Image: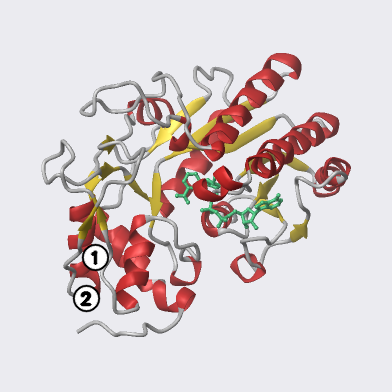
Amino acid sequence: MTILVTGGAGYIGAHVVRLLRERSDVVVVDDLSTGSVERVSDTPLVEIDLAADESSAKLASLMHEYGVKAVIHIAARKQVGESAERPAWYYRQNVGGMAQLVLAMESAGVDRLMFSSSAATYGLPDVPADVLLSETVECRPISPYGKTKLVCEWMCSDAQASWGLRWAGLRYFNVAGSGWPELGDPAVLNLIPIALRALTNGEQPKVFGDDYDTEDGTCIRDYVHVLDLAQAHLDTLDYLGRDERPYDVFNVGTGVGASVSEVLEQIAVSTGYPVDPPVVARRPGDPAKLVADVQRIQDTLGWRSTKTLAEMVDSAWASWVPIHGKPAVPPT
Ligand SMILES: NC(=O)c1ccc[n+]([C@@H]2O[C@H](COP(=O)([O-])OP(=O)(O)OC[C@H]3O[C@@H](n4cnc5c(N)ncnc54)[C@H](O)[C@@H]3O)[C@@H](O)[C@H]2O)c1
């Protein structure tokens, strides 16, 4: 059985491909806009831009050629700020790209789909800060990026009702770390890589507000190790084969948050850099606490995270030099 992984040449996709290859044949579709061939050098890769006009026919014929039985759809554009600057382009990339993929699946008779969704679908949820975010919380995405992910979930539900697509969406929280040094995150968009980039350049990372209603005053987020996340994809594929599938979406997090200060303290321990961050004004739209309720994925898929914050930061640091090059300023 061959699994098609879109976005398999990217950060998360390459981890999924590496685990998946232990049990299945895999073909990767990627336009290499942010991914790279070296990440999946031992796996067949077909270069297709999912959002291009002619992609649906190409995808359908590829599904026939490789005997594809299921699709893991990871490819997307993921920068919140860029999505606010270029909203129509984001909809075209993320929603348009997925529409082409689902059309191809329908035409090729491939009916199993795992979709990479995001905690960004929750946006600014209307729940007290101390409540864990369960999948039943109303989604109120604030960025065009988060909205594209929610629309994609709706598209899957509609295809399920219309022609029997069997789908499940994983709402990733903050993905961190690496399973292998050469597969580290090349993007510098999240707290851990942003702090590592500042420190390796001889600067201090900033803390945006320390007067939130949390124990140490800094924002709390749910960080999940990319290898744990990759395993959740394999468990989701198994779930799609079941007759009884009570849920369509699952949070993927640890269920335990870490504050900005706690993450920075761990970075100091893991890297040896002195960390003494300046506190600056809050960023607009940053909720005090966003932590996943992971009961559903634990009970239904039997998945739970296994790795600690220290393992996430240690592995992110181990992949820093292979991915980003030698620090301008070495640790003291
Ligand atoms: N990294 C995170 O913290 C995080 C959190 C929540 C959700 N996600 C979601 O996870 C997925 C993967 O994220 P990542 O961090 O690995 O990003 P990434 O940029 O490393 O990977 C995305 C991959 O998709 C490919 N791609 C993008 N647009 C494409 C298109 N139109 N056609 C074909 N290929 C295309 C890119 O070349 C790349 O290989 C995305 O859907 C993202 O929205 C990521």
The residue type indicated by label 1 comes to Ile
Q: Quadrant of the C terminus?
A: bottom left
234 or 7, nearer to the observer: 7
- Percent coordinates x, y for residue 10 in the rendering: 58, 58
37 or 274, nearer to the observer: 274
Which of the labelled discs sits on residue 221, or is there none?
none
Residue drawn at x 17%, y 61% is 265
| Furthest-top residue in this view | 161
- Percent coordinates x, y for residue 188 in the rendering: 45, 62
Please give the residue where the numbered disc 1 appears in the rendered image. Answer: 267
Residue 52 placement, left or right of 188: right
Q: Is mark 2 within 8 Å of ligand 1?
A: no
Q: Are marks 1 and 2 in contact (CB under 8 Å)?
A: yes
- Percent coordinates x, y for residue 294 in the rendering: 34, 31
- Percent coordinates x, y for residue 261 in the rendering: 18, 54
Does residue 241 appear in the picture of this structure? Answer: no
Q: Quadrant of the N terminus?
A: top right
| Furthest-front residue in this view | 281
Of the numbered discs 1 and 2, the one sitting upstream in the chain is 1
309 or 180, nearer to the observer: 309
For label 1, count other residues whose C-alpha is less than 10 Å away and answer few (under 14), some (14-19) or many (20+): many
Q: Measure the C-alpha gap from mark 1 to mark 2.
A: 8 Å
- The vertical placement of 273 against 257, above or below, is below
Which of the labelled discs sits on residue 273, or is there none?
2
Q: Is mark 1 within 8 Å of ligand 1?
A: no
For label 2, count other residues whose C-alpha is less than 10 Å away and answer few (under 14), some (14-19) or many (20+): some
Report helix, strand or loop for mark 1: helix
Does residue 9 appear in the picture of this structure? Answer: yes
- The vertical placement of 131 against 236, above or below, is above
